[in-house]
Amino acid sequence: MPVCTPAIYAQPAVKALLADEAAALLPELGGLAGAHGLLLSGADMRPPRTPMLDCWTHLSARSDRRWEGDIRARQDEPLPFADDSMRVVVLAHALEQVSHPVALLDEARRVLAGDGLLAITGFHPASLWTPWLAWKARQGAMPVLSMPARWQLRLRGRGVRVYAVRRFGHSWPLTRSHAGENQAGGGYLLLARKQTNVVTPLRTRNLRAPPSSLTAVSWAPGLQRESA
């Protein structure tokens, strides 16, 4: 599958859309507290400022199918992070850039900690941005656009609950920013939480009462008459 050149994200109209994206994403990340966050981006973006999160790891997708940034890695290999190690994972236009987006989504779910936040952004295919992107990418590969419902279906039943899907930005490419939600906007934001593993108590078995340690005592006939 062809991989889009990152130059498409340097277009002024796309930069304006990315500004709207950051404005839509920041309120969701502002209250997060934890040790680590992971930003995987198709564009040259900066991690958001989250004062309650200790540190971010940022990797950008490159046209040679590698990740570059705080560390270097191959896109066709598992992410070099432990299971349940990230408080938040942001896939910012990453799924439309890599050659194996479903595998990347599964890896993002793996490294996300319990009750952690997963945020996915991208161009919405059902907008006027689609023909504009095709025209801009006529000399190269275009981003592979997918409806957010595709990722929602992939996450269903895998321990991640999608609780919001929103659109933002202008309906058609403009160079000025337009903060706020737009039902026909050119970008989408999917928000999900990884469910924590709850310990299910085992059903207890009915235990028989232990036999009494005292044995039945029979009184002598004479003693019974005296007591009567």
Image: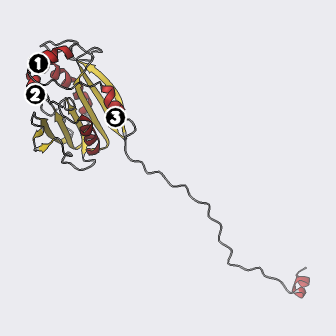
Q: Indicate which disc, 1 or 3, sits on the residue closer to the N terminus.
A: 1
Name which residue lies at 13% across and 44% down: 73
Q: Residues within 10 Å of mark 1 (few under 14, many from 20)?
A: few
Residue with the mark numbered 1: 138
Name which residue lies at 24% across and 17% down: 180
Residue 95 position by quadrant: top left
Q: In terms of secondary structure, where does tag 3 sit?
A: helix
Looking at this view, name the residue that lies furthest to the front.
1
Q: Quadrant of the N terminus?
A: top left
Residue with the mark numbered 2: 5
**Label tally:** 3
Rounded to the nearest angstrom, the CA distance separating label 2 from label 1 is: 11 Å
Residue 86 point in image, percent of width and height: 24, 44
**Which one is nearer the viewer's eye here, 113 or 124?**
124
Residue 200 point in image, percent of width and height: 47, 51
Name which residue lies at 65% across and 67% down: 209
Residue 100 position by quadrant: top left
Residue with the mark numbered 3: 154
Viewed as shown, does residue 200 lie left or right of 177?
right
Q: Is residue 49 visible?
A: no
| Looking at the image, residue 107 lies above or below residue 141 | below
